[in-house]
Image (cartoon, rainbow, N blue to C red):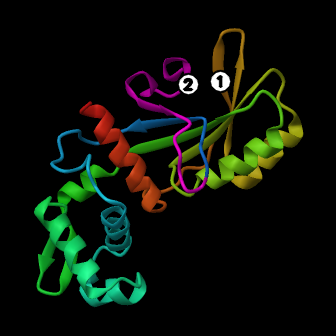
Amino acid sequence: MAAGLPFSWAERAITFQEPELPSGAPDVLLLRLKVTDIHGAASLTEHELKLLHFISSRSKARIRNITDLLCWSPKAAAKTVASLAEKQLLSVRGDLLVPSLNAKSLLARDIIAIEAKIGGWKRAIIQAQRNKWFASQSYILLSGTVPAAAKDAAETEGVGILRYGKGRTEVVVRSEKMRLPGSYASWLVSMWGHREAHA
């Protein structure tokens, strides 16, 4: 499916169909990685991903912030910090934690979520809006004529519409571009991409 989509890098994309995420299961995910040779990127735990997101969203953090804001025990925080430091995804400078260049490269360059619906565009837009939680762009895919109400709703919610017809797919409404990472799920999807790249 990716090869027929109207994105310049779609043919080289890592593709997932209906992956299970906390916000639901988008029909299709397209990923473009920055690099594919990061040590340990394919085997991160949920705690490690959440900590990476926490620190990266602030550029830096202190260990006491982790225990206070994430409600982790000191033991759990220390264990996760040590593991990320060993994987060279985190730099530890005394009590200060800073994401490494490897961590910044681990995050995908682009994550496009697509909800492919034959009908029921209203439900598709609701799910596409949820996908903005982790994706850099979020679309619904419809066939045939796209109702004006669907276009208006998509523009209001910041999601895009793709239309399939006569053997080709075109952009009807372009998605808003969200900055990555939107949540720890952006890191989770990126990790899946690295795992797939090395499969």
Image point (40%, 29%), residue name:
13
Q: Which residues are magenta?
A: 1-23
Q: Which mark is residue 6?
A: 2
Residue 113, horizontal then vertical, whole percent: 56, 41
Q: Residues within 10 Å of mark 2 (few under 14, many from 20)?
A: some
Q: Residue at x 14, y 67 (%)?
A: 85
Identity of the residue drawn at 32% across and 34% down = 196
Please determine whether, in this image, residue 10 is positioned above or below residue 187.
above
Determine whether 49 is above or below 105 in the image: below
Classify 10 Å Cα crowding around label 1: few (below 14), some (14-19), many (20 and above).
some
Q: Where residue 18 sits: x, y (%)?
A: 56, 36
- Precedes in sequence: disc 2 or disc 1: 2
Q: Is residue 164 above or below residue 25?
A: above
Q: Please, what is the three-letter code of the amino acid marked with disc 2? A: Pro
The percent coordinates of residue 189 (x first, y second) are: 42, 47
Which kind of residue does numbered mark 1 sit on? Answer: Glu
**Can you identify the residue that label 1 sits on?**
170
Q: Nearer the viewer, residue 182 or 178?
A: 182
Numbered marks: total: 2
Q: CA distance from mark 2 to mark 1?
A: 6 Å
2 drawn magenta: yes
Q: Are marks 2 and 1 in contact (CB under 8 Å)?
A: yes
Q: Is residue 53 left or right of residue 148?
A: left
Q: 148 or 108, which lies in front? A: 108
Res 110 quadrant in image: top left
- Looking at the rendered structure, the secondary structure element under dot 1 is strand
Residue 21 among magenta residues:
yes
Query: Which SS class for mark 2?
Result: loop
Q: x, y (%) of residue 197?
A: 28, 33
126 sits to left or right of 89: right
Q: Quick check: can you spot residue 26?
A: yes
Give the label on residue 48, or none. none
